[in-house]
Image (spheres, rainbow, N blue to C red):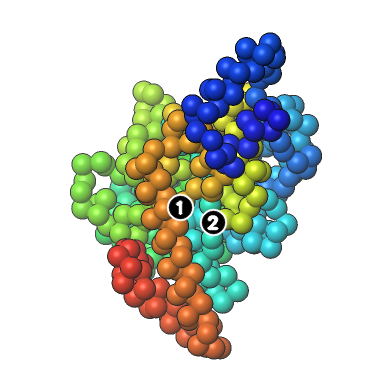
Amino acid sequence: MLLRYLKTPHKRGRKPFQLAALLVSLTVAGVTLAQPSQPELPRQMAWTAYNLGTTGYNQAVAIGAMLREKYNVTLRVIPGQNDVSRLLPLKTGRVDFTANGVATYFAQEGMFQFAAQQWGPQPLRLLMTSNGLSNQGVAVAADTGVTSFAELRGRRVPYVRAAPALNVSIEAHLACGGLTWDDVVRVDFPGYDAKWNGIINGDVDVGFGTTVSGPPFRLEASPRGIRWLPVPHDDEECWQHLQAIGPYFTPHIATRGAGISDDNPHEGGTYPYPLLTTLATQDSDLAYSLTRAINENYDDYKDSDPGAIGWALESQVFQWVVPYHEGAVAYWREIGVWTDEIEAHNQSLIQRQGVLATAWTEVTARGIRDADDFVEAWEALRAQRLEEAGFDPVWR
């Protein structure tokens, strides 16, 4: 009975002093107390992640190895070429979680690829995220001689189909240099890995990604070499333009990545990656247990990939742009890191999702058949309803 009580903290109604009294009474009665039970996890799980060889995929596989060793769980990690292919299996119930990127935010907002009638704003939740010593930045082939974003004018820039997380982020960095897509030569690619191969093969000159991902290391080792373009933290105008398009970026100094070290850091920006994402409807027991298992066994996978150190407890960012799942919140509150301030922020994000859901119901009821007309109507109504509720629409 006590073990069942300990392993379901999110269902507890008792206060801490009541638990203490229970423990004392059992001790006095001569009962030997066992350690809290292990997290209860299913024998099989499936996640989506970025392509093979990316840091997001590698970290998911490493966590899967830990789950197999510690809990006899078989984790199937399904690589996805783009944002839609990673989130669609979650939306349709084919996978339980996704080790996703910032597209989690775009899907929550129902924007870009997710403004289509078959998508709309998604009720997504986080369990935890990876926040390492890397950056999310723009790299150029070193042989181009480019050293700033303004110098990308007229250069060949990749555009990954169905991947707004990549395309909006590179657009935000172009804005830092006063450029738009109209100022560069857009070259389309089917996926993240293909884009980096395009740089190596000389088809494009630049790419966006995490500094510790596998493809940038391949570019570094190629004859072209690699150079990460700086986003100076004291350049207020640059950051104003960048965050107007990518509000999820924050200034950060990277000391890990291709061509990056403690002696050669990169001054740029970043956001959590990967983000362990699920739906709001996900079972709270599972969300609690998985969060607990990943946190308690951090030492077992932290050295598996240069970015895996980002899962450390002290690296968690609880006040970002997507809310946390109630099961994960129960665990974070249980170990004392979830504060009233964080809870207020989380509830505000959940309220934002509610406004978006209501607006989506309103626009779909109009029966607009033309796809372009529907997107235009949705984007206008979305911005209006968010502003009325006191939220920043970000994109109009």
Give the amino acid at mark 2: Leu
* Quadrant showing the N terminus: top right
> Considering only vertical position in the picture, is 230 above or below 358?
above
Sequence-wise first label, 1 or 2 = 2
User: Residue 393, how many percent across, how many down?
Assistant: 35, 66
Q: Secondary structure at mark 2?
A: strand
Q: Secondary structure at mark 1?
A: loop
Whole-number angstrom distance, CA of label 1 to CA of label 2: 7 Å
> Considering only vertical position in the picture, is 59 above or below 97?
above
User: Residue 274, how many percent across, how many down?
Assistant: 54, 43
Residue 17 at least partly seen: yes
Give the amino acid at mark 1: Val
Crowd around label 2: few <14 · some 14–19 · many ≥20 (10 Å): many
**Residue at 33% of width from left, 68% of height from top?**
389
For this view, does 237 lie left or right of residue 128?
Answer: left
Can you identify the residue that label 2 sits on?
124
**Residue at 39% of width from left, 38% of height from top?**
339
* Quadrant showing the C terminus: bottom left
Question: Which residue is more in the foreground, 143 or 1?
Answer: 1
Where, by quadrant of the figure, is residue 87 drawn? Answer: bottom right
Contact, mark 1 vs mark 2 (Cβ under 8 Å): yes
Where, by quadrant of the figure, is residue 150 drawn? Answer: bottom left
Q: Which mark is residue 322?
A: 1
**Residue at 65% of width from left, 50% of height from top?**
283
User: Residue 161, how many percent across, how many down?
Assistant: 56, 64
> Considering only vertical position in the picture, is 191 above or below 340?
below
**Residue at 20% of width from left, 49% of height from top?**
236
For this view, does 377 lie left or right of residue 293?
Answer: left
